[in-house]
Image (spheres, grey):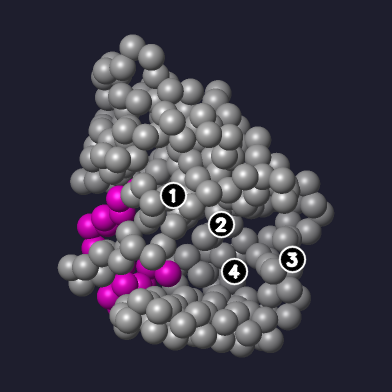
């Protein structure tokens, strides 16, 4: 295992969920391993490349969990394992920018509970910087439901949240917004999400969430999948796409929200009309 360069490391636990990421993993780890005092890496199912060997060079907290096909259910496990309250959540295709590295020690001293960093999306050779991702947070101040596309949310309205222009670089190997690649990847996730929505709610991994049913927006879509899942939610994203297209004077934002609309239509069509066991 490699030793951290700093004699005093930050009380931050980095959590990662990966799946055969040998080509990207070390780039991600090298961007933070000398800053933090704990790194937890979970592999989603059997590893068939060198990801585990790479991970073990930097941490002895590497776990292989049963394959699910998405990261979110495993994230609850990483929060439970983390010794620190501060969590830095990084995917294999992400890495800290130089400015974020240089300022992260100051960020956790500011009294803010959740930081959402500028999260550039790469599409056809260009970066788009209007998106933010909640990646640094105090686990005691958030809740999380482990379903596809789930993300941490403030535990209550007293939680302090800040959008930061420090960049969490995001550079996957492929163009995720090429139509056929988007459809292949996201339609697989949609089918997993259908199964999650149809399972016993008590069996869904959750962090700091004690309600006896889904959160309100999800509950509406599950109860009324045609109206809320296939019509109103896609319509909302199309309107948002048009708004952002004119705001940023760029067609990309329309395309991104159009794909999101397709995702919801496909998701709740399958939820309503398909047998998930087929």
Write down the residue under mark 3.
216
Q: For numbered disc 2, what is the local secondary structure? A: loop
Name the quadrant of the N terminus: top left
Q: For numbered disc 4, what is the local secondary structure? A: helix
Q: Residue at x 67, y 81 (%)?
A: 228
Whether pointer 1 and pointer 4 mark residues with C-beta atoms closer than 8 Å, the reply is no
Q: For numbered disc 3, what is the local secondary structure? A: helix
Place of residue 7 in the rendered image (x, y in percent of width and height, measured from the top left): 33, 12
Which one is nearer the viewer's eye here, 274 or 117?
117
At label 1, counting other C-alpha atoms closer than 10 Å, the crowd grade (few under 14, some 14-19, many 20 or more) is some
Residue 130 showing in the rendered view: yes
Whether pointer 4 and pointer 3 mark residues with C-beta atoms closer than 8 Å, the reply is no
Write down the residue under mark 4.
194
Label 3 and label 1: CA atoms lie apart by 27 Å
Q: Of tags 4 and 2, which is closer to the observer?
A: 2
Write down the residue under mark 1.
164
Does residue 82 appear left or right of residue 185 in this picture? right
Label 1 and label 4: CA atoms lie apart by 33 Å
Q: Residue at x 55, y 44 (%)?
A: 114
Label 2 and label 1: CA atoms lie apart by 21 Å
Name which of mark 3 and mark 1 comes first in the sequence: 1
Residue 277 - label: none
Residue 218 lies in quadrant: bottom right
Name which of mark 4 and mark 3 comes first in the sequence: 4
């Amino acid at each position: 295992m490699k030793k951290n360069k700093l004699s005093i490391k930050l009380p931050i636990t980095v959590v990662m969920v990966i799946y055969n990421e040998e080509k990207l993993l070390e780039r991600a780890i090298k961007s933070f391993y000398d800053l933090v005092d704990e790194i937890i890496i979970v592999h989603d199912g059997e590893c068939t490349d060198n990801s585990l060997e790479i991970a073990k060079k930097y941490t002895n907290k590497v776990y292989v969990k049963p394959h699910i096909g998405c990261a979110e259910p495993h994230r609850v496990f990483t929060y439970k394992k983390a010794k620190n309250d501060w969590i830095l959540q990084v995917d294999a295709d992400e890495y800290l920018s130089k400015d974020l590295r240089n300022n992260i020690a100051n960020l956790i001293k500011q009294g803010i509970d959740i930081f959402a960093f500028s999260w550039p999306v790469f599409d056809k050779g260009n970066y788009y910087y209007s998106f933010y991702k909640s990646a640094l947070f105090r686990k005691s101040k958030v809740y999380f439901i482990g379903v596809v596309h789930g993300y941490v949310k403030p535990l209550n309205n007293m939680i302090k949240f800040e959008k930061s222009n420090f960049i969490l670089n995001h550079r996957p190997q492929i163009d995720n917004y090429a139509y056929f690649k988007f459809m292949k990847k996201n339609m697989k996730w949609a089918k997993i999400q259908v199964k999650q929505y149809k399972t016993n709610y008590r069996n869904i991994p959750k962090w700091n969430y004690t309600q006896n049913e889904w959160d309100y927006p999800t509950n509406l879509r599950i109860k009324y999948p045609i109206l809320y899942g296939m019509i109103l939610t896609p319509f909302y994203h199309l309107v948002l796409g048009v708004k952002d297209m004119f705001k940023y004077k760029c067609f990309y934002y329309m395309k991104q929200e159009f794909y999101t609309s397709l995702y919801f239509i496909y998701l709740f069509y399958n939820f309503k009309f398909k047998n998930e066991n087929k």
